[in-house]
Image: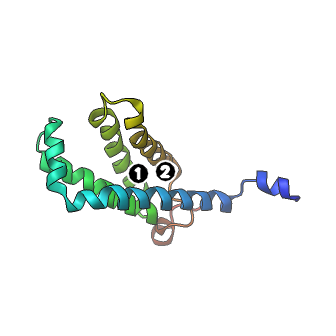
Amino acid sequence: MNYSQRLAATTPTSSDLGLLLVRLAFGGTLALVHGWPKMFDVSQFAEGVARLGFPAPSLFAFAAAAGELLGGLCLALGLFTRPASLLVLVTMLVAALHVHGADPFAKKELALAYAAISLALLVAGAGRFSLDRVLFNRGAT
């Protein structure tokens, strides 16, 4: 197989490696850049949630922050990948459609990108290089 054929080929290993890289970058960024700061200032985040008209703003703020932090960490590790993907997907759709519903697309774009990646991981699963595979023998290709 020559170099161009190898570049064009998709193997189970390359697909699983791709899923690992997406999970690490996406989950790690979501957890550390978005979820972690919200968890340490959840009361200020809850004030913003209250201004949006959510009932029980402290509860919704905590749920969103925990969804980003714990969901992101689980995705990065490939642990409970499909439930974590669903949690993140719902959180990101609420952010895009409700929180930024009246905003221009540029404000919704990041939440929609996270939602799309969450949906892809919900469909594809974690792949072989994951804790799901190690602990539950899920993700085998």
Residue 20 vertical placement versus 122 (above, below): below
Report the quarter where the C terminus lies.
bottom right
**Mark 2, residue position:** 121
Element assignment for label 2: helix
Q: Which residue is drawn at 42% across and 53% down?
A: 82
Q: Is residue 52 left or right of residue 89?
A: left
Q: Are marks 1 and 2 in contact (CB under 8 Å)?
A: yes
Q: Which residue is drawn at 42% across and 35% down?
A: 106
**Mark 1, residue position:** 85
Sort mark 2 into few (<14), some (14-19) or many (20+) by Cα contacts within 10 Å.
Answer: many
Residue 47 at what x, y percent from top left?
A: 13, 46
Residue 19 at what x, y percent from top left?
A: 56, 57
Residue at the right extreme of this rendering:
2
The residues bearing labels 1 and 2 have C-alpha atoms spaced at a distance of 6 Å
Residue 39 makes an appearance in the image:
yes
Sort mark 1 into few (<14), some (14-19) or many (20+) by Cα contacts within 10 Å.
Answer: many
**Looking at numbered disc 2 in the image, what kind of residue is underneath it?**
Leu
Q: Is residue 21 left or right of residue 90?
A: right
